[in-house]
Image (cartoon, rainbow, N blue to C red):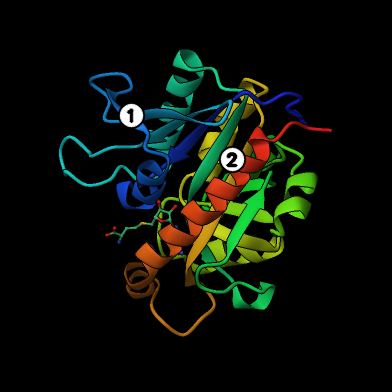
């Protein structure tokens, strides 16, 4: 597992503008425009003390004009970030579905280094099954979780906001605490580069709760994004502290 020794530079990847804006405003990051035209990813840059902080937001889809959520923009963005910025640590920040049965509550924030799984890649050919599921563990976050009072756990990604029965059983099999649409795609790229990755995910909706996911997501997006930015500021301040 890659373990960052000295961290002087981090890059945070967000899928949605609304998830990223509270942090961009609080850190007064400079708008650097597009990371790599004609791709839609937006780039913001600044610092927390001596720690250089880059924020990448997937940007607006050229055809549909909405945030580029999901796996392929996340993978492309990760490659571009590694080529152009080469941070010491990648952080996938965003919202997720949580699970009541694993202690999830609206606005709860997880900090995890994995494992990062896919739950919607079904390839029943022996050598490809494990590849399809992923399960990358890409950072040791034990000390950070202890210092910040945060929980870690498995993240599972797929390209749908809802889930079918097969997705549900894969999600259950790995005791997922955070269901999202980007982390595993970022993890695959990070792993090819042997680059540490952690995820900071705030719960917008409870997958095993009684409300439809899309309604809960819309209702709690802003609350969860504020909780996310509070935790990210604490985390970045912690990374900026000299290690004893
Ligand atoms: N309906 C929303 C679209 C949000 S898609 C809108 O109109 O703006 C969900 C985004 O939040 C993805 O980037 C994903 O990573 C995250 N997410 C939050 N809850 C999720 C869940 N239950 N399942 C999958 N992804 C979720």
Q: What residue appears at the point 54 percent right and 61 percent down from the top-left corner? A: 167
Q: What residue appears at the point 70 percent right and 63 percent down from the top-left corner? A: 175
Residue identified by numbered label 1:
30
Q: Which corner quadrant holds the N terminus? A: top right
47, above or below 110, in the image: above
Q: Nearer the viewer, residue 208 or 120?
A: 208
Res 42 visible: no
- The answer to whether 221 appears left or right of 62 in the picture is right
Which percent across, then down, holds residue 172? 66, 66
Q: What residue appears at the point 54 percent right and 48 percent down from the top-left corner? A: 232
| Quadrant location, ligand no. 1 | bottom left
Report the number of discs.
2
Which percent across, then down, holds residue 159? 42, 50
Which percent across, then down, holds residue 153? 70, 56
Q: Residue furthest front?
A: 49
For numbered disc 2, what is the local secondary structure? helix
Would you say the beta carbon of the disc 1 residue lies within 8 angstroms of ligand 1? no
Q: Earlier in the sequence, mark 2 or mark 1?
A: 1
Q: Nearer the viewer, residue 220 or 117?
A: 220
Q: Badge 1: how crowded within 10 Å, few (<14), some, or many (20+)?
A: some
Residue 108, quarter of the rendered image: bottom right
Cβ atoms under marks 2 and 1 closer than 8 Å = no
Q: Residue furthest right?
A: 244
Residue 40, quarter of the rendered image: top left
Which percent across, then down, holds residue 68? 31, 42
Q: Badge 2: how crowded within 10 Å, few (<14), some, or many (20+)?
A: some
Q: What residue appears at the point 43 percent right and 20 percent down from the top-left corner? A: 80
Residue identified by numbered label 2:
236
Res 100 visible: yes
Q: Residue furthest bottom?
A: 210
Q: Nearer the viewer, residue 21 or 38?
A: 21
């Amino acid at each position: 597992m890659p373990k960052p020794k000295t961290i002087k530079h981090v890059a945070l990847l967000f899928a949605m503008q609304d998830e990223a804006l509270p942090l961009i405003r609080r850190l007064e990051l400079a708008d650097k425009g597009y990371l790599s035209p004609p791709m839609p990813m937006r780039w913001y840059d600044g610092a927390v003390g001596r720690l250089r902080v880059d924020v990448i937001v997937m940007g607006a889809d050229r055809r549909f004009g909405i945030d580029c959520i999901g796996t392929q923009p996340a993978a492309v963005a990760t490659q571009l970030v590694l080529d152009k910025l080469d941070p010491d640590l990648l952080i996938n920040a965003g919202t997720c579905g949580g699970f009541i049965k694993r202690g999830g509550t609206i606005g709860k924030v997880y900090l995890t280094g994995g494992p990062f799984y896919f739950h919607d890649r079904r390839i029943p050919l022996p050598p490809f099954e494990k590849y399809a599921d992923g399960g990358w563990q890409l950072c040791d976050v034990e000390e950070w979780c202890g210092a910040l009072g945060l929980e870690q756990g498995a993240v599972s990604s797929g390209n749908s906001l809802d889930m079918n029965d097969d997705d549900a059983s894969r999600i259950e099999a790995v005791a997922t605490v955070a269901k999202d649409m980007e982390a595993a795609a970022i993890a695959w790229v990070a792993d090819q580069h042997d680059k540490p990755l952690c995820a900071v995910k705030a719960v917008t909706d409870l997958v095993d709760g009684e409300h439809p996911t899309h309604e809960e997501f819309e209702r709690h997006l802003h609350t969860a994004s504020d909780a996310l930015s509070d935790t990210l500021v604490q985390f970045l301040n912690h990374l900026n502290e000299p290690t004893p």
